[in-house]
Image (cartoon, rainbow, N blue to C red):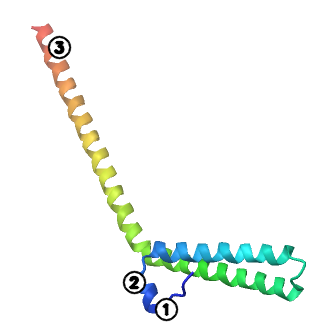
């Protein structure tokens, strides 16, 4: 995996940064397992691998949190737009139902008046 500089991170999308972080974490996890089960590796190698995995997971969590914070306003706007559409549709349906009830009530009154005469 290539190393990214801060300017390169700005050029990448949030998804690319998170995918790269996840790939790095998985590679560190693989190295950790390899070192743990390799008889030729010392305990310090295993500890170093575990530390590297921890650092990688911390970076991934930091990037994910940053992505969530950065995109939260977009999500709020999208949710608000969907909510407005739902409320508008419910309001339209309610008004249609109300009109239909009024029409039926008026038709019933007309029918009753027609029977009285």
Asked if marks 1 and 3 touch (Cβ < 8 Å), the reply is no
Q: Secondary structure at mark 3?
A: helix
Please name whichever residue, 71 or 48, is drawn nearer the observer in this view of the structure. 48
> Which of the marked residues, 2 or 3, is nearer the chain's N terminus?
2
CA distance separating discs 2 and 1: 10 Å
CA distance separating discs 2 and 3: 74 Å
Q: Which residue, given by chain and number where applicable, does mark 2 sit on?
A: 11
Residue at image x 50%, y 77%? 17
Please name whichever residue, 60 or 45, is drawn nearer the observer in this view of the structure. 45
CA distance separating discs 1 and 3: 82 Å
Q: Position of residue 14 (x, y in %)?
A: 46, 75
Split into 4 quadrants, where in the image is the N terminus? bottom right
Q: Find the residue positioned furthest to the left.
A: 117
Q: Dividing the picture into quarters, in which one does residue 98 lie?
A: top left
For residue 112, the mark is 3
For residue 5, the mark is 1
Residue at image x 31%, y 56%? 84
Q: Position of residue 24 (x, y in %)?
A: 62, 77
Q: Position of residue 33 (x, y in %)?
A: 79, 73
Q: Which of the two marks, 1 or 3, is nearer to us in this view?
A: 1
Q: Secondary structure at mark 1?
A: loop
Q: Find the residue positioned furthest to the front.
A: 40
Please name whichever residue, 39 or 50, is drawn nearer the observer in this view of the structure. 39
Residue at image x 86%, y 83%? 41
In the image, residue 41 above or below residue 100? below
Q: Secondary structure at mark 2?
A: helix
Split into 4 quadrants, where in the image is the C terminus? top left
Q: Position of residue 94 (x, y in %)?
A: 28, 40
Asked whether, in this view, residue 81 is left or right of residue 99, the answer is right
Residue at image x 41%, y 67%? 75
> Which of the marked residues, 2 or 1, is nearer the chain's N terminus?
1
């Amino acid at each position: 995996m290539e190393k990214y500089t801060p300017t390169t991170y700005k050029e990448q999308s949030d998804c690319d940064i998170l995918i790269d972080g996840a790939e790095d974490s998985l590679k560190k996890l693989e190295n950790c397992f390899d070192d743990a089960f390799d008889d030729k590796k010392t305990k310090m190698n295993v500890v170093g691998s575990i530390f590297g995995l921890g650092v990688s997971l911390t970076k991934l969590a930091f990037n994910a949190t940053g992505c969530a914070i950065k995109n939260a306003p977009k999500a709020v706007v999208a949710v608000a737009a969907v909510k407005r559409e739902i409320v508008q549709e419910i309001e339209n349906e309610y008004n249609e139902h109300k009109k239909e009830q009024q029409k039926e009530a008026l038709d019933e009154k007309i029918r009753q008046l027609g029977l009285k005469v």
